[in-house]
Amino acid sequence: MKKIIKKTPLNSVHKKSGAKMIEFGGWEMPVRYKGIIAEHNVTREKAGIFDVSHMGEILINGDKALDELQYLVTNDVSRLKKGQILYTPMCNNSGGVVDDVLIYCKKEREVYLLVVNAANTDKDFEWIKDNIHQENVNVVNISDKTGQISLQGPFAEKILQKVADYNLKNMKHFWFEEDIEIKGVKCLVSRTGYTGEDGFEIYIPWERTELIWNLLLEIGKDNGLEPCGLGARDTLRLEACLPLYGHELRENLTPVAAGLTRFVKLDKGDFLGKDAIEEELSKGPEYKLVAFEMLERGIPRSGYKIVKDDDEVGFVTSGSYSPTLRKNVGLGYVKTEAAKTGEEIHILIRNKKVKAKIVKKPFYNREV
Amino acid sequence: MYPRDLKYTKEHEWIRVEGDEGTVGITHFAQKELGDIVFVELPEEGEEVVQGDSLAVIESVKAVSDVYSPISGTIIQVNQRLEDEPELINKDPYDEGWIVVIKIKDKDELEDLMSNEEYQELLEGEED
């Protein structure tokens, strides 16, 4: 059977503009336009626009929607007010991460939108349906109807304000507003992102996504806005130490090991993975996710071994040249006893031990 | 973009032969495919290489890629500038972005390589 690769509503726009396309999570996506470093820098310094229509959107509604979500995820969804967003891991019974998701509260207790990783959309949809107890809670996968554009960088607000009929100054980080009109198209706009910069994610009816993309690129020109691909998205999120599913997050590692304990609320009642996470917390995780920078020449890559003295103590989950720091950096799991800031480790690169040092997370923090 | 005086491999290396020495680099197509080059791992001078063996490693932001030797021989010079300025390969793949000079062991091996015309034909196939 031929593998079907999905296309976003902007597929032909990317190809026409000469973007280099790759497959990611079952989707054909642009990895870069002009170059990853230039796109990375423009997002840090001005603004970048990203096609993230591959992300999955799952709508959950019903009288008991909140109760179901409280059981499905580790964070406390009851804290959400209408218009507010929460980041949370979603775990299995052994405390492993099924996915990390954003939950948008559209109506308190009753209507929530989950934004999930592209490669996990189908898995999550089945997982949620299988783990819901109530009959009158609806779970709808609206991914195929929803386009998504991410506008990121210090000039993001200035650019979007030119075309949005809403005062964006009133939108706080991790809040959203529905039915904001952009060129007559009703969009859901949230102040969120995956770059470590200020920015917005815009949810658009599938067939109007191209219109909004072209409009934003046009009106953002004066502010230096450039289209960016998944390559820059990855280096930006790595500098900000935002985890990526399949790399830092996996079904056999808990949120505790991943350093996401602050998104686990043990006092909210029962939830999937609670017992396992409690146990992990009490005895301490075997591995911990750490950030490190290279002290000798070499680029760490996902899957490389981490050694200390001559013992294998862990593995790299992400690594790259960091355009902002101009250093080679990485994230990886290291045995807890070795996972201390300042500790020297070695990354095994092509069978050579290359020196690195564990540093504080994140590598990059924007000045506010 | 693909100078006439060079010979090419199907893995996108080039060699410029002068006497019994050959200067080696990667082609314009290869640097464009890789994108921003941020790291080059170079061999040592005096190392022996066999045609088709990995000679150096080039890393772009996203990709790790081997450079294969177009010819057998001894490495007599390496472009140390690439350690601090790997982007020279992007900017000037045929001149400042050269990687090594090899003292050629057997010139007959050059027969295995492609002319610029043959290489361009190969690229037309790849770009489809």
Image (tube, coloured by chain):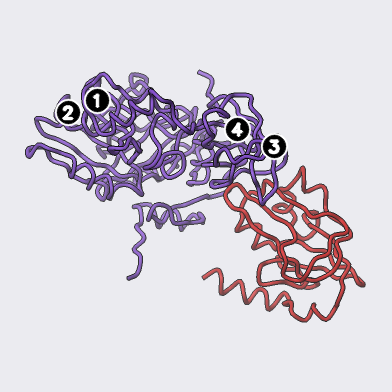
Chain colours: A purple, B red
Real-space Cα distance between discs 1 and 3?
Answer: 42 Å
User: Which circle marks residue A292 in the picture?
Assistant: 4
Identify the amino acid type marked 4.
Phe
Task: Tell us which disc is closer to us: 3 or 4.
Answer: 3
Does residue A246 appear to the left or right of B86 in the view shown? left
**Image point 27% across, 50% down: which residue?**
A122
Give the labeled residue for mark 2.
A66
B65 sits left or right of A126 in the view = right
Disc 2 secondary structure class: helix
Instruction: Identify the image quadrant of residue A279.
Output: top left
Residue A238 point in image, percent of width and height: 52, 36
- Outermost residue on the left side: it is A136
Q: Earlier in the sequence, mark 2 or mark 1?
A: 2
Q: Which residue is mark 3?
A: A355
Q: CA distance from mark 1 to mark 4?
A: 33 Å
Q: How far apart are the two marked residues, 2 and 1, measured between alpha carbons?
A: 7 Å
Q: Secondary structure at mark 1?
A: helix
Of the residues under marks 3 and 4, which one precedes in the sequence?
Answer: 4
10 Å neighbourhood of mark 3: few (<14), some, or many (≥20)?
A: some
Mark 4 against mark 2, which lies toward the viewer? 4
Query: Could you tell me if the residues under marks 2 and 1 are in contact, i.e. CB atoms within 8 Å?
Result: yes
Q: Which amino acid type corresponds to the residue marked 3 in the rendered image?
A: Lys
